[in-house]
């Protein structure tokens, strides 16, 4: 075991979760694309099972466990509506994929790539999609609730190898798209095969239903996938912060954040010297902005990470019984203020952690009473010293142990959790 000391700071609050009672009867999904219109959440793609596993090749990314429905989750009643898609409709196969890049801009959800199958008879995922879809969110919600035709909500489709990516992140800002990191995995998944990492920030616009002004900022330093990229709001202008990602040459997670300054064809980036302790894999994340102090805090909620904390020994362990990246319970606050990023890992018993090994490929749904329109929590709206439910943790993977296996397999999380901010 290795003792690790985190860079500490006084964030002024803790983030915790507690189970919602009673637990709403909603579908459990992981690695899904999603968007929101009012109190209704649109859910597309992803999988209905846990971690894909590394053995039993006939079951890894089995199409039987892909989500082949579109769901609408009503947060005002905590009920859901399901529209089952036709699995024999070739035009809908991208909707059955996982790890798509996606971004919501007002009423439009953009979906890019994803790993799935191009054959209606395919038993396993074997292809990274090369299409970008633009979806009208309110109209798609209406089609789901009326059991209508989802094709009516698709505004346009663009096909290009430039968007053939899975496991990256997509952000649109000032009319320009930034498709960051990820990979193009060809063929059925096997542990002896690596996908083609983009190692790039791909920049483009959509003009007249076609890609335009395309450019790639490429560097081997950008060799990452399955990570967290968030917008860091600042008075001087927002930028993108990248946390984690896999895999290093040693098969581990990346621990140095990358900061991207979006400027179209002149986009630049820099790598921080800070070392992120844990949560290197894509997980539920909460962005909290305090306009008064121009401070942005990103809470990374569990997931998968290099170091895990053991409460009984008060030690951090590097990996778990040979597994380099175990499931973790930790909640990490990455705080940006006055030009610097620092981290605070909430360590029990002084600060809470997750009640289970949760968070990987999960979704944070912001409480609209305390958030901006993009889902960022507005710290100014949180009054007093009482605990505040700022949102909800939905879906993702749950594991019974830090290293799941065939004996103790992980599963999809079917429990909804309230996410709470408690001022100190």
Image: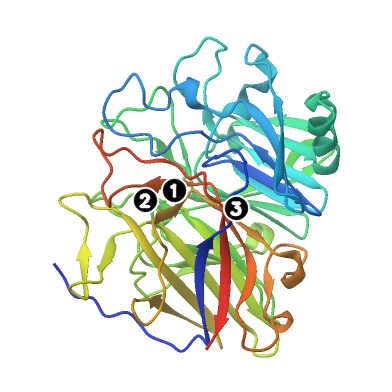
Return the residue at label 3: 22
- The answer to whether residue 154 shows anywhere in this view is no
Residue 47 lies, with reference to residue 248, above or below; the image says: above
- Binning the other alpha carbons within 10 Å of mark 3 as few (below 14), some (14 to 19) or many (20 upward) gives few
Q: Secondary structure at mark 2?
A: loop
Return the residue at label 2: 246
Q: Residue furthest front?
A: 22
Q: Secondary structure at mark 1?
A: loop
Question: Percent x, y for residue 108?
Answer: 79, 46
Q: How many dots with numbers?
A: 3
- In screen coordinates, is 151 left or right of 21? right
* Front position among marks 1 and 3: 3
From the viewer's side, name the closer residue of 122 and 301: 301
Question: Percent x, y for residue 397?
Answer: 44, 45
Return the residue at label 1: 225
- Binning the other alpha carbons within 10 Å of mark 2 as few (below 14), some (14 to 19) or many (20 upward) gives many
- In screen coordinates, is 86 left or right of 318? right
Label 1 to label 3: alpha-carbon separation: 36 Å
Residue 234 lies, with reference to residue 64, above or below; the image says: below
């Amino acid at each position: 075991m290795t003792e690790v000391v985190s860079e500490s700071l006084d964030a002024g609050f803790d983030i915790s979760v507690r189970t919602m009672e009673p637990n709403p009867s909603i579908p459990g999904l992981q690695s899904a694309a999603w968007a929101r219109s009012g109190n209704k959440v649109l859910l597309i793609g992803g999988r209905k099972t846990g971690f894909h596993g590394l053995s039993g090749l006939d079951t890894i990314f089995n199409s039987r466990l892909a989500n082949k429905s579109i769901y609408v989750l009503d947060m005002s009643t905590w009920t859901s509506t399901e529209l089952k898609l036709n699995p024999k409709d070739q035009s809908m196969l991208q909707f059955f994929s996982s790890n798509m890049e996606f971004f919501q801009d007002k009423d439009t959800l953009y979906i890019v790539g994803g790993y799935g199958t191009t054959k209606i008879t395919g038993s396993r995922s074997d292809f990274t999609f090369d299409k970008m879809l633009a979806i009208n969110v309110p109209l798609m919600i209406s089609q789901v609730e009326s059991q209508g035709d989802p094709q009516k909500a698709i505004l346009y489709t663009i096909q290009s190898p430039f968007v053939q990516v899975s496991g990256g992140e997509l952000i649109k800002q000032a009319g320009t798209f930034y498709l960051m990191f990820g990979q193009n995995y060809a063929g059925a998944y096997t542990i002896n095969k690596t996908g083609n990492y983009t190692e790039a920030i791909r920049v483009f616009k959509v003009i007249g239903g076609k890609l335009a002004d395309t450019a790639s900022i490429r560097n081997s330093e950008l060799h990452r996938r399955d990570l967290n990229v968030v917008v860091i709001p600042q008075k001087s202008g927002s930028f993108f912060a990248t946390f984690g990602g896999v895999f290093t040459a040693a098969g581990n997670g990346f621990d140095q954040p990358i900061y991207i300054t979006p400027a179209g064809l002149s986009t630049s980036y820099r790598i921080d010297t800070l070392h992120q302790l844990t949560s290197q894999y894509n997980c539920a994340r909460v962005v909290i902005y305090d306009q008064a102090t121009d401070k942005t805090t990103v809470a990374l909620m569990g997931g998968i990470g290099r170091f895990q904390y053991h409460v009984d020994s008060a030690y951090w362990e590097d990996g778990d019984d040979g597994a380099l990246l175990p499931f973790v319970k930790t909640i990490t606050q990455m705080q940006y203020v006055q030009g610097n990023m620092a981290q605070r890992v909430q360590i029990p018993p002084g600060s809470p952690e997750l009640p289970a090994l949760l968070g990987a490929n999960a979704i944070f749904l912001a409480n609209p009473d305390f958030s901006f329109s993009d889902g960022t929590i507005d710290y100014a709206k949180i009054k007093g010293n009482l605990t505040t439910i700022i949102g909800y943790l939905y879906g993702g993977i749950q594991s019974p142990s830090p290293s799941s296996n065939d004996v103790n397999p992980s599963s999809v999380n079917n429990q909804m959790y309230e996410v709470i901010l408690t001022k100190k």
